[in-house]
Image (tube, grey):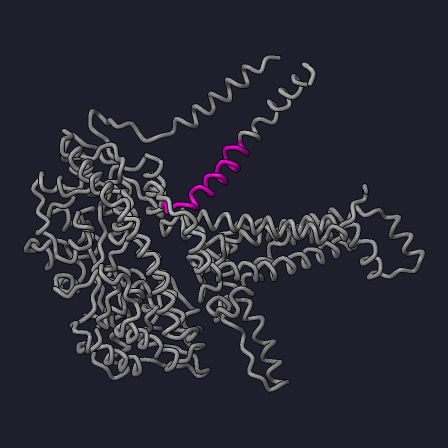
Amino acid sequence: MSARPGIISCLGFLLLVGCGGPSPSNHDGRTVIQYWEKWSGFEAQAMAELVDRFNREQNAIHVEFLSVSQIDRKLMLATAGGNPPDVCGMWANELPALAENGALTPLDGLMAQTGLDPDRYLDAVLRNMTYRGRTWGLPTTPAASALHINSRLAREAGLDPDHPPETIAELEAWNERLTRRDDDGRLAVLGHIPTEPGWWRDSFPLAFGASFWNPADGMTLQTPAMREAFAWIASYPERFGAEALRGWSDLGGQFASPQNPFFQGRVALVMQGPWMHNFIAKFASPDFEYTVAPFPAAEDSGLPFLTLVGLDVLVIPRGAKHTRAAFTFMRWVNEQQQLEALNRAHFKFSPLRETSEDYYPAHPNPHIALFAGLAAHPEAQVEARLPSYRAFRNDMNQAVDQVLFGDISIDEALAMVQRRQARRFDRNRDRWEQVGPTRTATWDRVEQAVLKQP
Amino acid sequence: MTAGERQRLKRGLAFISPWLIGFLAFSLYPLIASFAFSLTDYSVLAKPVWIGADNYSLMLEDAVFWKAVTNTLIFAALAIPMSLIMAFLLALLLNAGVPGTGLFRTLFFLPSLVPLVCLGLLWRWLLNGQVGLVNQGLQPILDAVNAVLGTGLQAPNWLVDPAYAKLGLVLAGVWGCGHAMVIFLAGLQDVPRQLYEAADIDGAGFWRKTWHITLPMVSPVIYFNGIMGLIGAFQVFAVPFVMTAGGDGPGRSLLFLATYIYQNAFEYWNMGYACAMGLVLFLLILGLTLLATRLLEKHVHYAGR
């Protein structure tokens, strides 16, 4: 019996499987661009509506919008495989790693050519968009962190929520007054704990005037300011007891759920962003009362408060097939009207210096002016702009957790992070010395090539 | 080699070619490639930069790597014997010929069908220190002990206390011992009846028969389950990753080698370092498997020999 039909069937199958690729790049004569976005739920819905509007209002480009989970890993693999989307929604703290590894298209030339002035963005937003002197992403939605106060718990403790704490010392005085234990000695209500929600554990030292690195010295994680910050964290197990804190933490409670410890009244003060208003409306009880204030900084830090400005950005991955069309879409999203519509739907402020007159008065978040003011402040901070940011954040999170539960000393924690991160920093610096000139030349070449595209 | 033999060789190779191609493409090539990448600073996206043995020297001084190795060894030392003993005891019970064996076999096997991600989520709640079922059952017992002895024992916060986190994971692992149990059961049912009958005539009791007949006769099955358990324990990833929402656990007490490799490869852009650690993990499993084979050589009895 001949084996030929079997072989042909196998080849046919392989051909069918192997032919799965991107959608056709033409849709009714339009250029089709693929857009991956990390958001889901109402956030994705808001962007999907903008995409629909873009597709309706012009007839040269058609955007295919796809909500993608674990977008960072998928983008990495798709880019390495040579089949990335044309536009991708990313977190700005990922830009240094992506740019350093040559995964993105620089945007400065396209911005200049299309008259998109970088000065229209808030300074903290612009710092989030750039790395090594180039722009890698255009903003979608910015956020600033602030102190959220459970007003009822504050009043019950004899505190005035309209006069919030202004220094770390005052925050801890509030913490003492707000914390309650049940009959078994367990922590029923905590005033404040740095691990709830724990999203900015790595950045708390900024409230003490610490800085994480500088080009001359590399990583600087064993400075007096860092020690002061960790001494603050180490005071928690001393005051509340490590086991009691573990017990409190073990109860957990997902962020986007009615079990959120802040909504449950298990913690009275949390650092959160402008999105919180929406989640409170959705998941907290209808009579939940809260107010927002700047998160305090240490008295001797030289800072009026601690606010971290984060940003969601749109990027064009290396190897994108329709760079020009992708930028046209990103440029359209960055028009004032679109940015305001998107950020209003996300309960956030605009990344632009100028807003329309009715933007803030008509905004659904009653505290939006405070967030916008924090983000526009010259002392607004951004997360460490390091290509090794994730590893840095994980090490810092571990250090904070272990000190918070009294497992290791401050010196051990800081030495651990310094040793590991200094090694990474040095390796990145060495690699950049080796590949930097080539990489910079490639960026210039890519930029020139994109500018010549029709 | 005659023409006929050559012809047969060609046919033989053609028949095993799907496996051969798979082995070359998906096992041998990645192994060689990961060795090559382990000598570079490689982020997947950018071209690898040659750094010689730097990844290996980094490994020597990376405290977190050693923590992951220690965690993996401790977990393996706890999980393998516990799972084996539990699976063997369950198989012995099921082999005792009690009524409803089929039902019990199904019930004991069922948990091992639960997907690993679900298992992680399930045990995250079961082991919750405040509201988890494990502590709801354990605390009354500890209270009784406290009342008698005047002690102050408290059920632990399993997954937020570094001292107990690995033990919690071992408990979750034992839950899925159904596969090993079924293999043990097959081995037990294969033991010739006449050996037990002869032992009965000699007046041997249950334990003597277990020690002198059952264990030697199922020793190849114990060996097989042991090696599979060893490999599984060194590759543990999904359950602790889901349980701890990221894979570190309190004080990195649930950070295992496989998780640390994953973090470096896909989160920290250090594919070169991850490749180096992957090779070390491979050599570790290979070495321990060879060691186990050598140590157990005299204790594993094959009926055919």
Side (left or right) of B91 relative to B230: right
Q: Nearer the viewer, residue A317 or A42?
A: A317
In the image, B51: left or right of A30?
Answer: right
Q: Residue furthest bottom?
A: B150
Image quadrant occupied by the C terminus of chain A? top left
Is B186 contained in the magenta span?
no
Which segment did they paint magenta?
B22-42
A411 horizontally vs A318: left or right: right
The answer to whether A23 is drawn above or below residue A123 in the figure is: above
Task: Name the foreground residue: A325 vs A274.
Answer: A325
Q: Nearer the viewer, residue B201 or A356?
A: B201
At a point 87% along the width and 50% down the height, the residue shown is B195
x and y, in percent, of residue B218 in the image: 76, 50
Question: In the rendered view of the protein, which quadrant contains the N terminus of chain A?
Answer: top right
> Which residue, as the protein is rendered here, is positioned at the far top?
A1
Query: Is residue B27 covered in magenta?
Result: yes
Q: Residue at x 58, y 80 (%)?
A: B143
| Residue A315 seen in render | yes
Residue B193 image point, x, y percent: 86, 48
Q: Quadrant of residue A203?
A: bottom left
